[in-house]
Amino acid sequence: MKFIPLILFILFLPILLFSQTHINQLIANCEHASGIEDRIESYNKIILYYSDKNPDSVNWYAEKAIDLCSSQNYDLGTARILNQLSIIDEKQGRVDLSRERSMKALTIYRKNKDLKGVAEMNNNLGSIEASKGNYNIAAKYFIDALKLYDSVTDNHGLLLTCMNLGNVYLQMNDKENAWKYFRKGEKVSQQTALSDATIFLHNTIGVMYASEGKQDTALQLFLKALNESDKPEFSSSHIESLLYLGEYYQEKGEPEISLKYLRMGLSVSVKYKLPEMQSNFLLEIARILEQKEPDSAMEYLECAKSLAEKIHSKVFLSGIYDEIASLLEHRGKYKDALAALREKQKLTDSVFNLEKTKEIANISSSWQLETNQQIKELEILNKHNALQRNELIFVAFLLIGVMLGFLFYIGKTIKLNKQLALNHKQLEELNAMKDKLFSVIGHDLRGPIARIPAMIDIIEDETTTEEDRKFLFDNLKEQTKVSLETFDKLLYWGRLLVKGISLQQQKFKPKVYIKESIELRKIKATEKNITVTDNTPSELIIYSDPSIFDFIMRNFLANALKYTPRNGNIEITTDTKSKPGFTVFGVKDTGMGIDPEIIPKLFYSLKSRDGTDNEKGNGIGLMLCKEFAIQNGGDIWVESEKGKGATFYLSVKS
């Protein structure tokens, strides 16, 4: 049975509840609020009202609320506004911005020792990581939240967190732990009044039973949740229960019963003015009608698309375009299907570009603020010392003894001037780095992207054969991945220069990441007829940051493919004995080798040789690999002879 991500729905519940309130009443309440707490609560409701209607209004009222909190030193109010903005950002696909705002709110709650607020932010951050597929990190956040809710005896928070933990472990296929937290949630629910969260829990446990083949038990729980929620105050969970029942009967192969429940859910969604749920029901109904009534299915999808556009839900709209493209393809309308896929890609790119642009802007602004502040502080110090020096000169005419003090301050001023000169030099170096960064963006990133439109034009040409289209699609996919990889390297580099590295070390099996790296470069290896052999044991476990390990191994493999001629070989090896406490990975190629005089500078230079097929590079990858490996507690090095290939090594903790 298809699993609905309740983790996210629980966070969006406040948005659904407040969406029915009239905006004029909300604004009037805000204007007449007596205290700052009531006023911030009113601002929160206004922000939630506009969340799926007008993004500009959301930002305007959020800024007003934060300015008010700042003027009255009400930090907790700022945290509450950031919390609501984080929920809206995640709903609309701005996951990185959502995480940034949750982290700021978490810092404020910790500073004010607000344990309930800290728990809520841990819950938010866990949900964000779960939406990105980082389930281990999500589980850690949820467990921290669970402990805090337990310490302040917040049963409602405990119930929601138990559900989130159960869902995370279910996504990780760890049913034992999933049942553990769902059962704990059941015990907590028995000590609290009936709520949406309790009904959601019954539905979630029903999904568990359905996944284990216990269909009758699952149906009983779904019907129980439906009956419990048949009250106006539980409209959100009632709609959710109807959706579960619709999907249940759809999976059982009884489309008529499924349609009955889905149409009931659509009717209730319209009644309570919940456009996102309306769009969800329309999409599910269209999927059932797709085979027998394609025209009706298309009408439902168009209606769902219209609603998703109104609430600015780019993530959900992307899924609708996917379904439209699938339906058009089945009907033989390939041109229209391709147009729908293009619209989906535009949405995906807009979300991606927004996050990446903001990340670059944050890096640049952080760098500028930090350097400008340092210079300002040094200038103030310099003026202060100059004043002291002048005073000592005047006093020196009267007291010879004061001359010693004067000389002391002269020395201090000289030292300060040297520090200013040093800072100026460092600033010039950072500017040079920045110029190199944008040079790489203009050269190495623009090149692959510029070829994409030409390839798409050829694909769309009716004279292009299916074999050529497949070849072009594969190359288009490779170009896109390479461009994204270059972009990520640039962001890694910028973040490293400004913020340093934040490690998330854990135990894991490296075989999975190495296999994915090989698969990512499969097309390139096939083009050059290079054989890649992976000798990594499946049972091997290492202790490292998975993303750093994956980044380094991908770079090693990419370099090996780049400098190995056609019909060559690449071998990935592991050694757990030569370096006690560490596992050493080796990527050996039969390529062109490296000149001995280049090896000492290899990991500290932004220069790169062309590959055997004239592949271009920029040197960022190996520079980052070296820095990341050291920060991760290991190291990288290379052994090579000119003309006899090279072996790149990475050591990580066992």
Image (cartoon, rainbow, N blue to C red):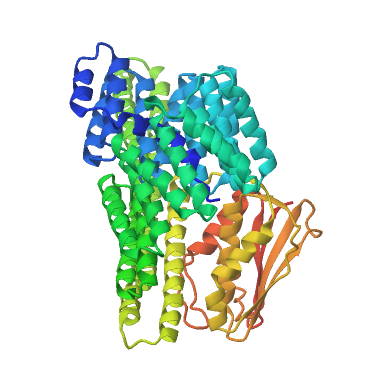
Residue in the foreground of this view, choosing between 204 and 509:
204
* Residue sitting at x 67%, y 38%: 177
Tell me the quarter of the picture where residue 342 sits.
Answer: bottom left
Return the residue nearer the eye: 586 or 273: 273
Q: Is residue 223 above or below residue 648?
A: above
Q: Is residue 272 left or right of residue 202?
A: left
Count of numbered badges drawn on the protein: 0
The residue at the point 33 percent across, 44 percent down is 278
8 on left or right of 562: left
Left or right of 32? Residue 180 is right
Residue at image point 42% right, 57% down = 288
Front-lying residue, 568 or 349: 349
Regarding residue 506, the answer to whether it shows in the image is yes
Place of residue 221 in the rendered image (x, y in percent of width and height, measured from the top left): 57, 36
Q: Quadrant of residue 513?
A: bottom right
**Is 72 or 422 nearer to us in this picture?**
72
Give residue 578's position: percent from left, percent from top: 80, 60
